[in-house]
Image: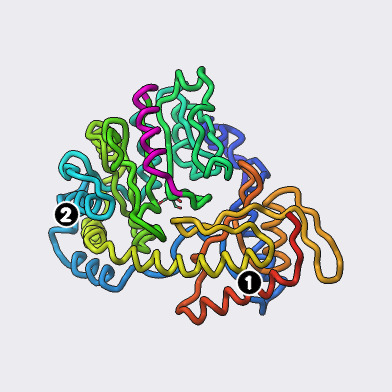
Amino acid sequence: MPESYIQNLFAERIGGSQYGKSTAIYKFEKIKRAKRAAIAAHPRGEIIDMGVGEPDEMAFPEVVERLCLEARKPENRGYADNGDAALKQAAATYLDQVFGVKAINPDTEVIHSIGSKAALSILPAALINPGDYVLMTTPGYPVFGTHAKYYGGLVHNLPLTQQNQFLPDLESIPANVLAKAKVLVLNYPNNPTGASATPEFFAKVVTFAKQNGVVVIHDAAYAALVFEGKPLSFLATPGARDVGIELHSASKTFNMTGWRCGFVAGNELLVKAYGDVKDNTDSGQFLAIQHAVAYSLQNPGITEKIAAKYSRRMDALVEVLSRAGFDARKPNGSFFLYTRSPKAAVKQDGTRVEFHTAEDVSQWLITEQLISTVPWDDAGAYLRFSVTFIAPGEQEEQRILGEIARRLKQVQFIF
Ligand SMILES: Cc1ncc(COP(=O)(O)O)c(C=O)c1O
C-alpha cells in the first residue's frame, strides 16, 4: 500500500501511526495458515476440524420457517431500535422455565442484543472510565476487556486452572486492583475450558460484588447447553439482580450464530444503561429475526436436542483421546473439551518431537495429522477440541471419530 497521511491519523488504541505495521501473527491466523498449508500439502487428505467455535448445523427448520413468515410482515420491516415486546416476553419466560429465574420484568429487565459479542462491546461505554479495572478470566473471550481498554480501562486477569475447577480465585486479587475494580466478567459454561459454575460459586460472587462495589457481567453464551442436570443461570442466585446482568445468545444454543441475536437481562439500572448506549450504537436487530429467536426461546427442546448430540460426541471423543494418553474429561456443558497438552510425541519410526507450548502441539497436529485444534497457553498448556466438527448423521460422526483414533494411534504422546 502507498504511504498515506491517513497512516498518521489512527487512534492510539489501535496502534496510532504504527497501525497495521506489526508483523506478529495472531493465534487464529496461525491456525488458518497452518490449515491452508496442510490442505496444499495433502490435497486429497481429509482435514478434521475441531478448532471451530460454532455449531456445525443450521438452525432448526421450524425456526427458519418462522423467520420466513415474520420477514413477510410489513410491520417488521423498519428500525427495531431496542426491540418490541415479543423477544423480551419470551426471554423472561425462558429464564423462568429453563433456569428457574423468577419474575424477570420483560419491560425493564430485558433488552435484545445483536449477539453477545455486540453487547460485550457496548457495555464498557456504560461503565468504564480511564483507570478503572476490569476483572477478566484467562483464558477467555476477550471482547469486554478489549473495549474497556479502548476507554482507558485496565484489565486484571484471573487465571482459570484445573486445580480450581477453572473457577477464578477471587481472593487472589491484589488490594490496589480491587480498590479500582468496577466489573467482573464471567462466562459459564466456559469457553475454552468447558467448565461449569456452581450455585455456591455464584453465591460467593454476589457477596464479593456487594462487598467490593463491583458489577458482575455473566456471559451465558453456552448456558443451556448442558449434558446433565438443569442449566445454571447467575440470575438464579439470591441477590444476583442487585449486582449484575446476564448475556444470553441464540448463537450456540439454537444453532443461530449468523443470525446475530441474543438478550441482556438482570439488574434494571444496568439494562437501562446498556439500552441507552445501544440506542446510540445500532438500530436493533431485524424484528423478523428477533421474533424467530423468541420462537426458539419458547422451544427450549431444540437446545436439549443439540446438547444431546454434543454429549454423544463428547463421550466418544473422551474415549478416543484417553486411549491416546490424554487426560480427557467430559465437561458438563458447552461444546469444548479442554485438555492438558502433551510435552512430546514419538512417531512409529522412533523420531521424537518436543513441544514447548500448546501452540507447538496444535501446529504439529494440523501439519502432521490434519487435525485442527485451538491451543491455549494462558494458564498452562492446553488444547481445545470442539465437537462441532462437520458430520451429518451418527454414522458419519462415528467414522470421523474412528479416523481421529486411527491417526492418533500412529504416535505416542508424552505428557
Ligand atoms: C464466551 C463467548 N461469549 C460470546 C460469544 C459471542 O456470541 P454471539 O454469537 O452471541 O456474539 C462467544 C462466541 O464464540 C463466546 O464463546
The residue closer to the viewer here, 168 or 64, is 168
Rendering coords of residue 236 (x, y %): 28, 43
State whether residue 162 is above or below residue 370.
above
For disc 2, the neighbor class at 10 Å (few under 14, some 14 to 19, many from 20) is some
Quarter residue 7 falls in = top right
Rendering coords of residue 111 (x, y %): 24, 44
Q: Nearer the viewer, mark 1 or mark 2?
A: 1
Examine the structure image and report whether residue 200 is included in the region drawn in magenta.
yes
Identity of the amino acid at label 1?
A: Ile
Element marked by disc 2: helix
Rendering coords of residue 324 (x, y %): 68, 66
Magenta-highlighted residues: 196-213
Q: Which residue is mark 2?
A: 86
- Seen at 40% across and 26% down, the residue is 182
The residue closer to the viewer here, 85 or 235, is 235
The residue closer to the viewer here, 160 or 319, is 319
- Return the residue found at the far left: 75
Say how many tags the image has: 2
Q: Which residue is mark 1?
A: 404
* Image quadrant in which the C terminus is located: bottom right
Element marked by disc 1: helix
